[in-house]
Image: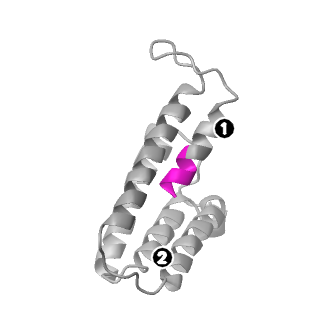
Amino acid sequence: MFFAVGVLAVLVARDYPLGSALRMGPAYFPTVLGVLLTLVGAATMVRGVTQPGTALGRFAWRDLLLILSSTVLFSILIRNAGLVAAVVTIVVVGAYASTRFRWGYALLLAFGLAAFCALLFIKALGLPIPMIGPWFGH
């Protein structure tokens, strides 16, 4: 995956001027990042072929669906239910994918992160995101 994304970044960046380290063009950062990702991917592939390891287990479909659904729920809730409900939902549903999930820790993290996001994005940065959305009467 690293290798493929790195090669893709370098290929896409070819259409833009590269520039130099002192006067970076729009292609400089994606090219450098793409090359680094390609090197990490190549090293990972070489290591995977040369080093013995344990066999892969079953694919975690349930966990994948929980993570994806938490992201979709966030995008639905951010406008209609507000930032607090969206952040709490994404954290709790995403945390539920873990084998070490505990309700107390998940809720503590969710409400702490919701408060931090509200302070940062709404109060400090002034982004026009409803803290509590129209579904809850605001």
Is 89 in the magenta? no
The magenta stretch is 1-6
Q: Position of residue 110 (x, y in %)?
A: 39, 67
Q: CA–CA distance between discs 2 and 1?
A: 35 Å
Q: For mark 1, what is the residue?
A: 12
Look at the picture and state if 111 lies above or below 129: below
Question: In front: 125, or 22?
Answer: 22
Write down the quadrant of residue 39 in the picture: top left
- The kind of residue on which mark 2 rests is Val
> Any magenta on residue 5?
yes
Viewer-side label of 2, 1: 1
Residue drawn 29% across the image and 73% down it: 52
Q: Relative to the observer, which residue lies in front, 79 or 48?
A: 48
SS state under label 2: helix
Residue in the picture at 59% in, 37% down: 10
Residue position for label 2:
93
